[in-house]
Image: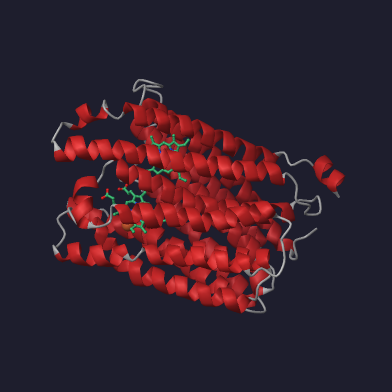
């Protein structure tokens, strides 16, 4: 067995749950993508708004399962000690799975709470907070009991603490819509352009150290630069959501300048990855994990950095706000940053957790899956960008009614669906490798 600490194995069910929910997310993505072409499809069983809700909620839930699994895997190696309580980790796992599943099934029966991404009913929200607190408690105790505390573990903990704290704003529902939206972004923006970025940077650093054999000190310097840039730009960068919602006018200036520089932490992650790989002390046999790791840096730079910058200046956002340009960026950013970093951790950690002595198999399939999914997602983003450009011109420049513009965008929605299917094929290959990586094959290689 290649894992060094027995308790690292508690991360395994987290990776399994993440992968299963990822598959479900994509199934719903295909359904709502198809509904763009055939609006009556599956109505009234799965109306578009409910399918969309399930698609994005599954996304957030599987990513958090992935983050937690990654944390339980790397913490023992980082702090040189076992997880404080694997029992707590398992209880927390089942609570999160049951809570998440109840929320998703509930949506199908109309049990939800309106606001995008935060649709979980009140009781489920409370359960989520309890689960995250249990996780953070376990994490802190593991760090206290461990033999050392590394920068990676501290940045990771900070990220999870932030995730918990900002989620609390989901409980605050002011009647005034401007105030409501103002705080809604405290969750949505400060998660993905703030504290989640810390989680990503910590996982990236861990992977790069393991995969390149380069000294921890080098990675830590980069990690601090990335964390600094994230906070410096991302917090006030929230202003790029305050241009048109009735918030004070100074946000045009502040939001513009700070969010424009949000590209920097993502650029730093690309530089960090290439530097570490080019100076590597050894060639790691898990080439797929190396590819997924560099992929996370590059695709997040494209999706968050480039596609984010594209519509972040108020002069441009005035036209693109709430169009398919937004959806295009949302897809490439979420996938490139958070889905890919979780998949990188999965590709690295899971072979080590398997009973079959951590032999790395199916590299070809995994590399095929990486490219199929990456290329498909880039084309999904490009097709939505195309749709967005048509929409901006017809609706925002010419003033054509919204529904009428849609009929001019059909070809782009068809292209999106086509690449949705190829994305699903790539994912199927990845998951086949994940779930059916049989011992017979591993033994043959060994
Ligand atoms: C990994 C990081 C990121 C993720 C996951 C992400 C995701 C998203 C999502 C899902 C939305 C749509 C929210 C909604 O209205 O429902 C959004 C909106 C937006 N994002 Fe990002 N984003 C990231 C980083 C960035 C960065 C770095 C920038 C700027 C450089 C940026 C600029 C914007 C802007 C301006 C909007 C508002 C679009 C509009 O007015 O309709 N994002 N983002
Ligand atoms: C088979 C591939 C996929 C298809 C066909 C698909 C389709 C869709 C559709 C139709 C919407 C609703 C857009 C709207 O309201 O107009 C949506 C929203 C969204 N999807 Fe996907 N999706 C896919 C994969 C993914 C993946 C892999 C991710 C992230 C890892 C993702 C993240 C999101 C996000 C963040 C939103 C909300 C975007 C926004 O509000 O701007 N999707 N998706
Ligand atoms: Fe934002």
Q: Residue at x 46, y 67 (%)?
A: 268
Q: Is residue 152 above or below residue 109?
A: below
Q: Quadrant of residue 263?
A: bottom left
Q: Residue at x 35, y 38 (%)?
A: 384
Q: Quadrant of residue 261?
A: bottom left
Q: Quadrant of residue 6?
A: bottom right
Q: Is residue 327 above or below residue 258?
A: above
**Residue 246 left/right relative to 8:** left
Q: Residue at x 26, y 59 (%)?
A: 240
Q: Residue at x 81, y 54 (%)?
A: 357
For the N terminus, the quadrant is: bottom right
Ligand 2, seen in the image, is in the quarter at top left
Residue 66: % across, % down: 56, 53
Nearer-the-camera pick, 271 or 253? 271
Residue 41: % across, % down: 39, 21
Tally the marks. Answer: 0
State the scheme by which the image is colored: secondary structure
Q: Is residue 114 visible?
A: no
Residue 26: % across, % down: 49, 37
Q: Is residue 24 visible?
A: yes
Nearer-the-camera pick, 168 or 393? 393
Residue 329: % across, % down: 37, 48
Q: Is residue 279 above or below residue 349?
A: below
User: In the displayed image of the protein, which residue is found farthest to the front?
Assistant: 278
**Residue 193 left/right relative to 372:** left
């Amino acid at each position: 067995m290649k894992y060094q600490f027995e308790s690292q194995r508690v991360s395994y069910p987290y990776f399994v749950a993440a992968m299963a929910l990822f598959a479900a997310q994509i199934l719903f993505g295909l359904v709502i993508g198809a509904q763009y072409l055939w609006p009556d499809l599956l109505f009234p069983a799965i109306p578009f708004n409910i399918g969309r809700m399930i698609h994005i909620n599954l996304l957030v839930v599987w990513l958090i399962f992935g983050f937690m699994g990654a944390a339980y895997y790397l913490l023992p190696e980082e702090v040189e000690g076992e997880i404080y309580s694997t029992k707590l980790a398992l209880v927390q796992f089942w609570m999160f799975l049951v809570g998440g599943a109840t929320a998703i099934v509930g949506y199908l029966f109309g049990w939800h709470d309106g606001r995008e991404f935060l649709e979980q009913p009140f009781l489920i929200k409370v359960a989520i907070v309890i689960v995250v607190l249990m996780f953070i408690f376990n994490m802190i105790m593991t760090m206290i009991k461990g033999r050392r505390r590394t920068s990676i573990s501290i940045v990771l903990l900070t990220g999870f603490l932030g995730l918990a704290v900002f989620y609390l704003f989901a409980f605050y529902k002011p009647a005034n819509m401007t105030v409501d939206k103002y705080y809604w972004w405290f969750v949505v923006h400060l998660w993905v352009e703030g504290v989640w970025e810390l989680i990503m940077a910590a996982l990236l650093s861990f992977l790069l150290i393991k995969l390149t054999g380069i000294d921890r000190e080098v990675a830590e310097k980069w990690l601090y630069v990335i964390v600094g840039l994230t906070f410096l730009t991302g917090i006030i960068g929230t202003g790029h959501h305050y241009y048109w919602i009735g918030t004070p006018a100074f946000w045009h200036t502040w939001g513009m300048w700070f969010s424009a520089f949000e590209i920097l932490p993502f650029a730093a992650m690309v530089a960090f990855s290439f530097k570490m790989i080019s100076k590597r002390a050894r060639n790691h046999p898990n080439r797929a994990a190396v590819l997924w790791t560099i992929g996370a840096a590059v695709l997040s730079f494209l999706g968050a950095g480039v596609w984010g910058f594209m519509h972040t200046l108020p002069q441009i956002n005035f036209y693109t706000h709430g169009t398919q340009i937004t959806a295009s960026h949302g897809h490439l950013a979420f996938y490139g940053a958070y889905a890919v970093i979780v998949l990188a951790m999965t590709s690295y950690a899971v072979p080590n957790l398997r009973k079959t002595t951590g032999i790395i198999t199916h590299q070809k399939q995994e590399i095929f899956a990486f490219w199929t999914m990456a290329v498909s997602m880039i084309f999904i983003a490009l097709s939505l960008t195309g749709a967005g450009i048509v929409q901006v011109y017809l609706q925002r420049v010419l003033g054509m009614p919204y529904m009428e513009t849609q009929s001019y965008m059909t070809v782009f929605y068809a292209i999106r669906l086509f690449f949705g299917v190829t994305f699903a094929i790539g994912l199927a290959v990845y998951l086949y490798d994940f779930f059916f990586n049989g011992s017979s094959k591993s033994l043959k290689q060994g």
